[in-house]
C-alpha cells in the first residue's frame, strides 16, 4: 500500500495538462457535422455509419470503395470479442447497425443503397476474410429520406441511472417496435414496463452482469478495450471510456493494472457492482428483439433493426442501453442464457439478439470514434 506522502509526490509529478484538455485530438469530432464537405456520397454515408452502436466500441468496420458507387464491407478480425462473443453474433449485429446508418444517410442524399449480405457466401462458423456486405447505389431508383436520419448524431448508449418511476408509455414502446421494421426481416420486438416480469428481468440482468464480472476470461477481454481518462480516450478513439481522475497517478500506483481491474473483489469493483445493481434495480422498462433463427444474415438484419430502435428511442427523448450478458454464448453464462430465453419467451430455435433497458435518464457524452480514414482500405 503506498504511503500518503508517496501519493502526494506522484500527484505533484503528474502531467495534468495531458488529461485536462491541452492539445489532444477531439475524441468526439466524428459526431460533429459528419460528412460535411464530402463530395463522394459513399464517404458521406460512411461518416454516419461509423456512429453506429457496436459491441465494446471496437469499431471493426473496414470498407473498400469500388468503382463509382460500390462499397464492400469487411471485418477487422482482430477487433472481435472471442470470449464473450464466441460466435461473432454480436459483432455481426454491430455490422447491421453500421449498414442501416449507411443506408439512412445515403437516402438523405437521394441514393438508394442496395445491400447484398455476404456476397461471397456466408461463413459456416465465425466471420472470415470475406465481405459481410456489398452495397451499391441503385442506378435506376432514388430513395426517399428517412426521418430517423435527424437522430443519428444524438443517438447514444446511455448507461446512467434511469428514472424508476417514469416508464416509456405503451405508445412510445409501440413506436420503437414499429420503427424497427426492416423489409424481409422476421424479428419480433418484445417490451415490458410493469409488473412481476420487470422485476424478474432486473434480477436476471444483474445476475448476468455479476457473473461476467466473476468470469476471468470475460474481464480480461474487456480490459483490453478500457480507455482510462481523457488522454487515453483521445489517443485510441475506440473502446469503453472510464472516467477516472488523474489516470497517470492511478497507473503509477498499479490501480489500473489488469490484475487489479479484473479482480471482482477489489474495492473499486465492489463499488462498480453496487452502481450496476442500482442501474438494474431502477430500470423502468425493457425491450428485446427475437429472431426466428440465427444465421449470419439474420444477425445483420437484427443489427439494422436495433439501430432503428435506438434511433427511434432518441427521437422520443428516451434513453436506451443494451444489457447483453445473459444473451452471450460462453460456457460460464449457460444457465442464465437458458433462463433469459425462457423469461423472454423465446422458443428453442429462436434467438434473443438484443435486450435493452429503456427509460428517462440524464444525457451522456458521445462515445469516441476514429476518423473515417481509419475505416477505408487503400
Ligand atoms: C450487439 C451489441 C451489444 C451491446 N451490449 C452492451 C452491453 O451489454 N452493455 C453495454 O453497456 N453496452 C452494450 N452495447 C453498446 C455498445 O457498448 C456501444 O454501442 C458502444 O460503446 C458505442 O457507444 P454508442 O452506442 O454510445 O455510440 C452493445 C451494442 C451492441 C451493438
Image (cartoon, rainbow, N blue to C red):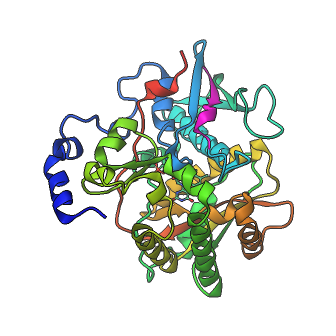
Residue 64 coordinates in the image, percent (x, y): 59, 20
In the picture as drawn, the residue positioned furthest to the right comes out as 348
User: Residue 207 versus residue 198: which sits nearer the camera?
Assistant: 207
In the picture as drawn, the residue positioned furthest to the top comes out as 67
Which residue: 81% across, 29% down? 121
Position above or below: 128 against 302: above
Residue 215 coordinates in the image, percent (x, y): 62, 62
Q: Is residue 170 visible?
A: yes
User: Residue 114 versus residue 66: which sits nearer the camera?
Assistant: 66
Q: Is residue 78 magenta?
A: yes
Which residue: 16% across, 47% down? 13
Which residue: 77% across, 74% down? 342
Position above or below: 339 against 92: below
Q: Is residue 116 left or right of residue 210?
A: right
Q: Is residue 297 left or right of residue 59?
A: right
Q: Is residue 141 magenta?
A: no
Which residue: 36% across, 54% down? 254
- The stretch in magenta equals 69-80
User: Residue 282 versus residue 337: which sits nearer the camera?
Assistant: 337
Q: Is residue 355 left or right of residue 281?
A: right
Position above or below: 117 against 293: above
Residue 272 coordinates in the image, percent (x, y): 43, 69
In the picture as drawn, the residue positioned furthest to the bottom comes out as 196
Q: Is residue 69 visible?
A: no
Amino acid at each position: 500500500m503506498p504511503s500518503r506522502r508517496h501519493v502526494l509526490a506522484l500527484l505533484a509529478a503528474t502531467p495534468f495538462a495531458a488529461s485536462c484538455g491541452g492539445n489532444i485530438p477531439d475524441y468526439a469530432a466524428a459526431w460533429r457535422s459528419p460528412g460535411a464537405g464530402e463530395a463522394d456520397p459513399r464517404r458521406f454515408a460512411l461518416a454516419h455509419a461509423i456512429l453506429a452502436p457496436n459491441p465494446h466500441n471496437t469499431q471493426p468496420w473496414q470498407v473498400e470503395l469500388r468503382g463509382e458507387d460500390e462499397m464492400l464491407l469487411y471485418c477487422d478480425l482482430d477487433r472481435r470479442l472471442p470470449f464473450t462473443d464466441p460466435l461473432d453474433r454480436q459483432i455481426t449485429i454491430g455490422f447491421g447497425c453500421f449498414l442501416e446508418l449507411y443506408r439512412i444517410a445515403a437516402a438523405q442524399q437521394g441514393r438508394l443503397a442496395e445491400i447484398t449480405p455476404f456476397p461471397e457466401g456466408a461463413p459456416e462458423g465465425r466471420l472470415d476474410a470475406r465481405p459481410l456486405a456489398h452495397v451499391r447505389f441503385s442506378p435506376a431508383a432514388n430513395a426517399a429520406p428517412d426521418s430517423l436520419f435527424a437522430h443519428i448524431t444524438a443517438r447514444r448508449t446511455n448507461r446512467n441511472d434511469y428514472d424508476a418511476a417514469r416508464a416509456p408509455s405503451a405508445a412510445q414502446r409501440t413506436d420503437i417496435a414499429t420503427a424497427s421494421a426492416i423489409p424481409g426481416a422476421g424479428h419480433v420486438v418484445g417490451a415490458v414496463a410493469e409488473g412481476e416480469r420487470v422485476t424478474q428481468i432486473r434480477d436476471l440482468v444483474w445476475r448476468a452482469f455479476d457473473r461476467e464480472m466473476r468470469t476471468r476470461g470475460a474481464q480480461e477481454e474487456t480490459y483490453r478495450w478500457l480507455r482510462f481518462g481523457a488522454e487515453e480516450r483521445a489517443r485510441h478513439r475506440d473502446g469503453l471510456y472510464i472516467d477516472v481522475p488523474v489516470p497517470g497517478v492511478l497507473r503509477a500506483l498499479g490501480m489500473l493494472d489488469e490484475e487489479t481491474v479484473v479482480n471482482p473483489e477489489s474495492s473499486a469493483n465492489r463499488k462498480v457492482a453496487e452502481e450496476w445493481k442500482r442501474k438494474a434495480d431502477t430500470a423502468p422498462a425493457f425491450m428485446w428483439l427475437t429472431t426466428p433463427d440465427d444465421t449470419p444474415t439474420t444477425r445483420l438484419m437484427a443489427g439494422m433493426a436495433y439501430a432503428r430502435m435506438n434511433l427511434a428511442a432518441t427521437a422520443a427523448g428516451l434513453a436506451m442501453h443494451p444489457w447483453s450478458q445473459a444473451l452471450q454464448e460462453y460456457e460460464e453464462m449457460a444457465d442464465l442464457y437458458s433462463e433469459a430465453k425462457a423469461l423472454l419467451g423465446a422458443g428453442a430455435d429462436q434467438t434473443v439478439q438484443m435486450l435493452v433497458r429503456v427509460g428517462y435518464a440524464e444525457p451522456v457524452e458521445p462515445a469516441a470514434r476514429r476518423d473515417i480514414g481509419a475505416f477505408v482500405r487503400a
